[in-house]
Image (cartoon, rainbow, N blue to C red):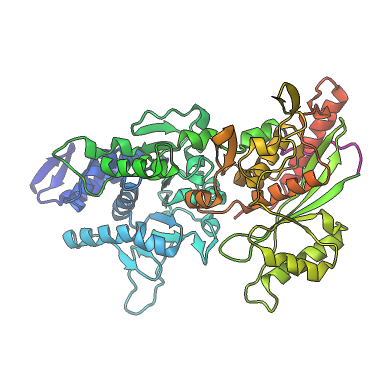
Amino acid sequence: MSNTIDGYGQQWPEGADQLRIEFWMIQNSKDKLKHYLAAHKLLWPEDEQHRWFKLGMKSIVENKISVFLGCASSGKTYIMASHALIDFFCFPRNSFSLISSTEKRSLEIKVFGRVKELYNRAKVRYEWLPGFILESSMAITPDDTDEENEFARELNRGIVCVPCVSGGRFVGMGKFQGAKPPHTPGKNDGILKHYGDEAAVMQPSFLDAYANWTVSPGFKGVMSGNPTDISDPLCVAAEPDGGWDAYHDNGKTQEWESKWYSAHVVAFDGRDTPNNDDPNKKYPFLISSEYINELRNTHGEDSWQLFQQGIGKPSRGMVSNRIITMGLCQKNKAFDIGLWADDKATVIYALDPAYAGGDRCVGTMIKIRNTAGGGQALEIGQPEIIPVKLNASMDAEEQIADFIFKKSEDNEIPPENIFYDSFGRGTLGNAFARKFGHSCPIPVDSGSKPSERPVRFDLFIIDKGAKRLKTCREHYSKFVTEMWFSVREAIESGQVRSLPKIVAEEGQLRLFEIVSGNRIEAEPKDEMKRRIRKSPDLFDCLAIGVEGCRQRGFKIQRVPTVEADRSNPLMDWFLQKQKDSLKMRRKSDLVRS
């Protein structure tokens, strides 16, 4: 009888490789976490298993979906790379791991670079480990090419990296939504996994792929990144069950269950770094309290830089100091179809011009209409991206002027009802003059001072003992703030209808603060773009349009609307039928990819 050894309640052949034992236990036991940790220690014995690493590995092993919020240098990428490789070594033939990040270069430098480094170190220690690196495909596959090249190498198993941004354009995960677990023929044992690095700076549609993946019993997903805003994909995936308004920051590393597929969230808080645990035990690759203090001293206690890079959680300001929120729009029926008194409307067209630098050139049509209950409201059209070709025979300004001229003619919009942001775009006015002649679109200088117009026509102050309307110059610090907050005021007044949700999603990205004179100031756009890494072009265009509406007689004021009157059964029936019709139409809408 051959000699055997005991291990984990099993009998193993004498001399059995301990790593193979751990792999077998991962494949067959229910208590898997300790075997993942043991395999990790055997594969990379020089790497530390600090408490953040153990917590992250526990989350991935024990949950279908994990979301890692965290500060810079918290080891999130390392945890994902380690788990992906251990799983590949254990299940080389029936596991398929998709690893995504922003651009190909980011993948190479960060997560795939870490995967390759770990893979190489493991192969040096255990030559028998499966896998072949394909640099050109950014993949690790279980199959090598045969000498006669008779069999194709399959890329539906192993580890494959997916860049979600190509040529500066978000291409997303759409082409991988149909990815399937690689089952062994005749079995249902395939494992499909997704590891999403830099999830905070993806587009919202990035999360759509999970709708198909989560139905697979063998699926496992991980989202990771530094939170930029509570509306970014990472924070959407991490939103607590009670919403971000109910979230409480305790200054420590926290865990909770999210609304999004009941994902398990781990928030690695830099103030709680393992480097604080033992003065004699330091992890140079993890964030330090000294770095956090540098961020605090440089940018301030409530700065987004401190919360994004040093703490790794949404700040209180990210939750409360927002110009609009989706909840505000929903509460005031801004997404609903309007109930109009007649077909009469004053049509406004808004333009937020852009020629290059990543910003989009956006146009939006808005109608000033009379509601069935009396008063005015705005019907917001869908935004459109105006194509501008940099290598065309016409200059960018001429292309924009030509597009707007045709739009004006096709929709019978008078040039004086077309408004565009002229700040920093002086030459566009010349292009309009050449195309339109004497009657041209109206420039709006977003860089000017606030106007002397009323904030709204029912907001009063007492001045020298007399009651009067409060002016925008008294209420706001800059004209661009007046423009953005005028949209909010119109929404809160119940005077906005058919607002596209994609526009509102952009609008809620911008924060505000109270400055000298108790005035409101919107977050500077350059700071916002550094924080969320994109420009709110769609909402900028809407703000220009609402400014145009104000110039053409639209008055912002809180007025009761017939939609708010729920005492009329006939009106209730009509509104319900209207919502049912809208729902039916939306079923045929194109789905984002």
Residue 442 in sight in this render: yes
Image check: 551 left or right of 8? right
Is residue 67 shown to the viewer in this render? no
Position in image of residue 320 (x %, y %):
54, 33
Q: Position of residue 171 (x, y in %)?
A: 55, 60
Point out the residue furthest to the front here.
Answer: 464
- The image quadrant that residue 136 belongs to is bottom left
Q: Position of residue 444 (x, y in %)?
A: 72, 53
Note whether 513 is above or below 359 in the view shown: above
Q: Nearer the viewer, residue 175 or 351?
A: 351
Q: Kindly report the secondary structure that dominates the magenta region of the rendered protein.
A: loop
- Using residue 393 as the reference point, say whether residue 117 is left or right of it: left
What residue is at 39 percent from the left and 37 percent from the top? 301
Q: Quadrant of residue 573?
A: top right
Magenta residue check for 336: yes
Q: Which residues are magenta?
A: 333-343
Nearest the viewer among 130 and 542 is: 542
Residue at image point 75% right, 39% down: 453
- Quadrant for the C terminus in the image: bottom right
| Residue 119 screen position, x and y as percent | 26, 59
Give the number of marks.
0
